[in-house]
Amino acid sequence: MKNEEFEIIRRILGGETQEYKKLVHNYQAAVYNVLYQMLHQHTEAEELAQDVFVKAYEKLATFNFQSRFFSWIFRIAINTAITHQKKAQRFLQLERLPEDIDHNAGNNEQQMMDKERDVILKKAILRLKETYRAVIVLHYFEQLSYAEIAEVLELPEKKVKSRLYDGRKLLKSMLEKQDFF
C-alpha cells in the first residue's frame, strides 16, 4: 500500500489532481475518527476533517516519502485538533457533554450507567493535556501500535510509551476522584 500511495502522490504532484480523491477516500473515516476522539464533537470533527484534507493537499509537495501517508495526515489531524482546541479554549468548557450522548435513550438501568460512565471517561480524556490525550486516542481508539504512534507524533517510541503510561496514570487518578471504579 505504501508504494501504491507514493505513486498516487507522485501523480498528484505531477498534475493529476483528481487522484487526490483516492487518498481522501482511503483516509476519510480514519481522519474523522481521530478528530472525533480528540474533540468529542461530531460537527467539529467533520468540519476539521475537511480542513485537514485541504491542508494536506496544499502541503502535499512537502511530503517526504520517508513515512507513510497515514502517519503524515494523522499528524496534520492531531495538530489541527490541538490548534482548534486552543483557539476555542475547550479546556475551560468541560461542563458541556459530548453531543453523541442521548440521556433519554433506553430505559435499561445498565445502559444508563454505561452512558454515564462514558460521559465521565470522555470528560476526563478532554481534561488531559493534549500530549497525553493524543497518545491515548491513537492507542486505544485508533488501535495504533507504539511504532505507528511514534511515527505519527514524530517522537521516539520510548517517549510514546512514557506518555501513554503517564497519561493512563493521570486518567486513572481523575477517574478515581469521580468514583469511576
Image: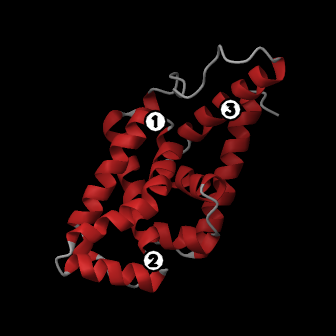
- Earlier-in-chain disc, 2 versus 3: 2
Residue 112 in which image quadrant: top right
Residue 88 in which image quadrant: top left
Relative to 161, say whether 77 is above or below.
above
- Earlier-in-chain disc, 3 versus 1: 1
Q: Residue at x 47, y 40 (%)?
A: 39
Relative to 107, say whether 111 is above or below.
below
* Residue at the spot of label 2: 68
User: Mark 3 or mark 1, which is nearer to you?
Assistant: 1
Q: Nearer the viewer, residue 120 or 47?
A: 47
Return the mark for residue 118: 3
Q: Say what amino acid the circle numbered 2 marks.
A: Arg
Return the mark for residue 42: 1
Q: Say what amino acid the circle numbered 1 marks.
A: His
Q: Are the residues tagged 3 and 1 within 8 Å (C-beta)?
A: no
Q: Residue at x 35, y 45 (%)?
A: 48
